[in-house]
Amino acid sequence: MTKTIDAYIDQHKDRFVEELKDLLRFASVSAQQSHDADTQACAQWVQGHLADLGLVSELVDQGGQPIVVARAKGTEQGCIVIYGHYDVQPEDPIDQWKTSPFEPVEKDGVIYARGATDDKGQFFAHVKAIEALIKTEGELPCDVVFLLEGEEESGGEALARFVRSEAGKALKPDVLVISDGDMFNEQIPAITYGLRGIITFEMTVKGPGFDLHSGGYGGAVANPAIILSHIIGQCVSQTGEILIPGFYDDVLPLTPWEVDNIRQLQFDDDILREEVQAPAIISDSKHSTLERLWARPTFEVNGIYGGYQGQHSKTIIPSAATAKISVRLVPGQTPDLVKDRIFDFLESLCPETVSLDLTYTGAGPPVVFDVNTPVMQLAKGALKHGFDHEPVFIRTGGSIPVVSTFFEVWGCPVVLMGLGLDSDGAHSPNEHFSLANFMKGTKASARFLSQGV
Amino acid sequence: MTKTIDAYIDQHKDRFVEELKDLLRFASVSAQQSHDADTQACAQWVQGHLADLGLVSELVDQGGQPIVVARAKGTEQGCIVIYGHYDVQPEDPIDQWKTSPFEPVEKDGVIYARGATDDKGQFFAHVKAIEALIKTEGELPCDVVFLLEGEEESGGEALARFVRSEAGKALKPDVLVISDGDMFNEQIPAITYGLRGIITFEMTVKGPGFDLHSGGYGGAVANPAIILSHIIGQCVSQTGEILIPGFYDDVLPLTPWEVDNIRQLQFDDDILREEVQAPAIISDSKHSTLERLWARPTFEVNGIYGGYQGQHSKTIIPSAATAKISVRLVPGQTPDLVKDRIFDFLESLCPETVSLDLTYTGAGPPVVFDVNTPVMQLAKGALKHGFDHEPVFIRTGGSIPVVSTFFEVWGCPVVLMGLGLDSDGAHSPNEHFSLANFMKGTKASARFLSQGV
């Protein structure tokens, strides 16, 4: 049976890739209103594609971007929900892209486009797996529901509202499958059993009512960009250690099994350094790199701006300066408590010469799943089949805020089978996705779905 | 004689204002190449206007923007050079302008436009003074040369090259007059006897080769925006105190006369605070506000940028972050020594996880002039005539880098008679200039020029 399915997938590879390219051409940047029409057109394309495969497919409006919900009935009991997101990150810095972000280019078995790995290429592997099952077997062992949102990259709440609605609760999946992450490396597939949480906010320091001549006023009027720098410097060290009082109090340490697992994974810092092209990576005698990436919180400035940014100089004291901040959370930490702790601290740092505007823009708690459940072992077997290599269990430093909502509402196991690579450039210029992994992932998904629940 | 001249100025006020508006319509933003054609058209207009008044007027090419040099012969010995600049600051932040920056608007006796006070309105007062003298007296007591540059706002070197050339040296003025600054307040005219110097540079912290996902890499890869914030915070305190070792070593204190002069000027901090619309101004028990503005160095961030600046959030570690810095210098300090001290310190602060790019973009030394020379007293009398109020001697926190070149090459007295107000918004949105001061300044200039040297 699996041989027939795999043969079907191999036979139709070229068409699958062309369809993926069609999907990647939509500039579905949910964070930017100017792309709302593209984002909605993308949702319609996905909905139509799933309908064409025979699923009962609809667009659900919960405010914000539409959610694609598509259901296929199975012959037996049980339900698998497959989550993904059809929205993508903004394309900037646009000048660093070697090809157009929304005109996919295939080169040496890799497809380049915004959203290729995050998350269009990954969820589309499951779409093609369903197609392969339907076309070869004619039936599915259990219900399969696609739940594809359009606000993952912009912190929207529409999907959470849907999951908490009567229709959402009624889905009652036995397992949730998500491919929106990474393999351990190019050869070794992985199941991600932990995600960091996140809060995001903006911080604006406001000084004078307008930009001032830095000669005429410098010395008497405080500079918001300097004060913003001080505030940032008091929150986080140059090596990323968070300096906010009590910040690490609730952080849970790794379990002995995790410490051992990390040791066995033999992560190579040099490979990471080369991959990111930085002069050096951060080293820390107390925590290994994987522990820092997976199980330690961070405080990152995602963007900073204020004053003159044009050619040459403009000698002003800027009237304001802003930082966009994301804070990654780990098990033991809760977004609201962390947010309050940070905001209280920030307000305590603001001198009387300026004012501080804080805007909380999004949150999701951290999650960790039990790796010893039967469904995790089934998923492990399916990945081994698709990738022809024993999978490993890993955590990730990224966040999928809605996962905690799924877990809270449905209480079912969540299987995160990432099909991408760290080096795929999710959120970066020249984002890409390996077509070999697209095919292997499709086969792994088909195997998993063919097993039922 | 002066009555006839003043009457001429009053009679032609409306035309003078219309001509000033024509001058203000040129978007002569020298810092932006996109405005090169506007800057050059402005130079041509000024050159033509002075030629129409009967001066021998030419555009001198020393590389960069053209210099307007226009000469009028006098009946007796001596030469007065009048310096000004026809280029202007960039208009951003454009959204904070209430009227179009390059379409002058007259309202309640004030003209609004970029360059109104800095410096088109101010040098044009001298142009109209020459016109009044020529039309009423038919002759000038001494040679008068206008030297109007187009790179004051962009740190260009063309004027300095001209002054150091044979043609420049040959001018040998007996006095140099500059109106590119401020009165003490709306009623009290002033002669500025000291300017701060300046150095400007850009500092870029470079980390990973491209923007990275802040989840996937946060904790292992240093964040350039955070490191830039730390570096800034180690250079300057929130109240503007410069923390660079040895920075204040060469700073000369005020003389007893200056301390007394500042006391008599009775500067009001509250008026400053209201003017700049800041929550509070910086207070310092050791130095008065005027001492801080005039005689203490500053380290200002004129602009800062890096990473994502769009709507919502984009959870990245930016690949780089940049700050544009200006440092004001005071007597005792020399730009090259200060620049070396700062750059050495900055390089010592850069951690191994990133690299630091420093670009030195401009410099000018501080200057202080003797207030007790005969020409200063003549200028004082002329201002008293034009403004009908006893003038005061002040310093300013601003910088006119070329002044030190004048002083070095010609060694002549420099008279800085500012016709603007601190509150005119030089370098800010909604820059403006009082037409009453335009007229008073024209009369003061005519009186000064009519006296010869």
Image (cartoon, coloured by chain):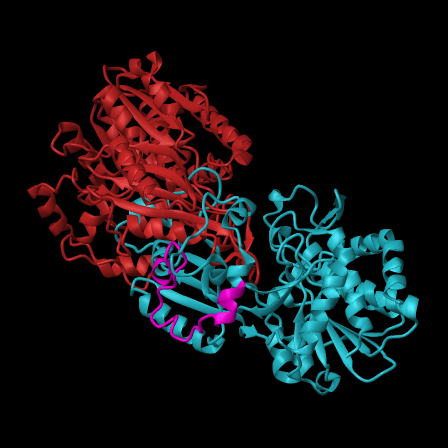
Chain colours: A cyan, B red
Residue B372 in picture, x, y percent from top left: 11, 32
Residue A432 in picture, x, y percent from top left: 68, 50
Residue A247 falls within the magenta-colored stretch:
yes
Residue B92 falls within the magenta-colored stretch:
no
For image coordinates 29% across by 48% down, the residue present is B235
Foreground of the two, B248 or A373: A373
User: For this view, does A30 lie left or right of residue B338?
Assistant: right
User: Quick one: quadrant of the C terminus of chain A?
Assistant: bottom right
Foreground of the two, A344 or A286: A286
Residue A147 in picture, x, y percent from top left: 74, 73
Q: Which residues are magenta?
A: A232-261
For image coordinates 89% across by 69% down, the residue present is A134
User: Quick one: quadrant of the N terminus of chain A?
Assistant: bottom right
- Camera sees residue B369: yes
- Residue A267, placed above or below residue B63: below
For image coordinates 22% across by 23% down, the residue present is B452
